[in-house]
Image: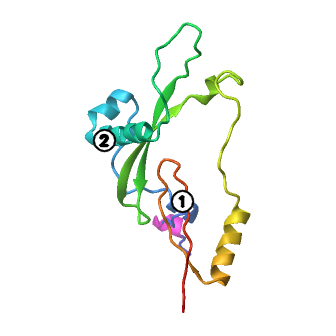
Amino acid sequence: MVTRSQVGTVKPNPHYALLTQKVSIPKPRTIADALNHEGWRNAMGDEFESCKETNTFTLVPRSEDMHVLGNRWVHRVKLNADGSFKKLRSRLVAKGNEQEEGVDYLETYSPVVRMASVRTILHMATVLNWEIRQMDVKMHSYTVIYKKRYS
């Protein structure tokens, strides 16, 4: 009896099959690498413009008694469902581990949806015959629209 390993036939492990990417755009390792690539530079510009439009931060003169937080860029290559290239995405994030409670923040807020809530909404949409649409949320603009189908 000849086994697959003896012949050299390898069956791919389905657990790791989803980790393959067809995109050959590497993530930048330094800010200089990102600024030298036109796609990453445009993604960073879009993020910075979005931050300015939503008044995410205000530039103020620095004083001696200020506790200044650092920041960094986080880069991601976004893919379509089939694994093809969709877009480059850059985010400017503050280094939250450097914050001091009562100095840099007074309270925290993190909008997180529980899976039970998602299942409940999907169940209601099915029972009430609502139309369900997928959308991309940009810059924390949370808008949910339910449209009822009339028969």
Q: Is residue 18 above or below residue 95?
A: below
Region of the chain picked out in magenta, as a range: 4-9
Q: Position of residue 101 (x, y in %)?
A: 71, 25
Residue at 51% x, 61% y: name it. 18
Q: Secondary structure at mark 2?
A: helix
**Where residue 42 is drawn, which disc sits there?**
2
Answer whether residue 52 is magenta in the image. no
Q: Is residue 120 above or below residue 111?
A: below
Q: Is residue 124 left or right of residue 69?
A: right
Q: Position of residue 61 (x, y in %)?
A: 46, 15
Residue at mark 1 = 143
Q: Position of residue 128 (x, y in %)?
A: 65, 83
Q: Secondary structure at mark 1?
A: loop
Residue at 41% x, 62% y: name it. 80
Q: Is residue 39 above or below residue 106?
A: below
Residue 46 vs residue 13, the one in the foreground: 46
